[in-house]
Image: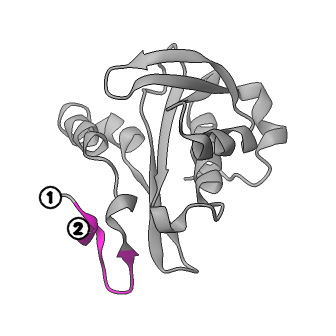
Amino acid sequence: MRGAAYWRAPGRACDDDAFPPEKVLRRWLDFMVTSPAAATWFAPRLYWVEAVGAIVGTGSFKTAPDDPLGVEIGYGIAARYRGQGYATEALRLLVAEAFARCDTPHVFATVNPDNLASQRVLAKCGFIREGEALDPDDGLVWRFVLPRNGRQSRLPHAEAID
């Protein structure tokens, strides 16, 4: 089942484009079957904003905490909530959680070169463009990295998630 209706509850809302992409849900469900311990790591995080009474977007880890390339993160905000700081805060929370839960040397994200909004969010959070790669699903992407030692001064508002 896919769509915002799946996440609806009394007094809560979720636009369809705030819902995690199907590939994120499939990966998470696969881990629930094959490695329940890893399922919590790969579970999509839903970003609920009390002031608007809605789930405004999602975020998740795309690589394992011990991946030698680092922890890759992904995030998305529903169209009507973009430009309001939710992506920046979602990214800060993902980064704080990654560094709190594992010893990864850095966190990284890949972004389409045309996605200027996401590039600005990454820059606000201290990420530096490191290079580019060919992604099998997304084509050419740029890789942005935030080293562990650079996070304290650049993420003043982030708090770890228990």
Report helix, strand or loop for mark 2.
Answer: helix
- Magenta highlight range: 3-13
- Residue at the far bottom: name it: 11
Which of the two residues, 17 or 125, is positioned nearer the viewer here?
17
- The image's mark for residue 6 is 2
Q: Is there a contact, CB below 8 Å, between mark 2 and mark 1?
A: yes
Amino acid marked by disc 2: Tyr
Visible in this render: residue 15? yes
Question: Which residue in the protein does label 1 denote?
Answer: 1
Amino acid marked by disc 1: Met
The residue that appears at 54% across and 78% down in the rendered structure is: 50
From the viewer's perspective, tell me whether residue 125 is left or right of residue 160: right
The N terminus - image quarter: bottom left
**Residue 10 is one of the magenta-drawn residues:** yes
Compared to 19, does 160 lie above or below?
above
**Residue 5 is one of the magenta-drawn residues:** yes
The residue that appears at 34% across and 58% down in the rendered structure is: 19
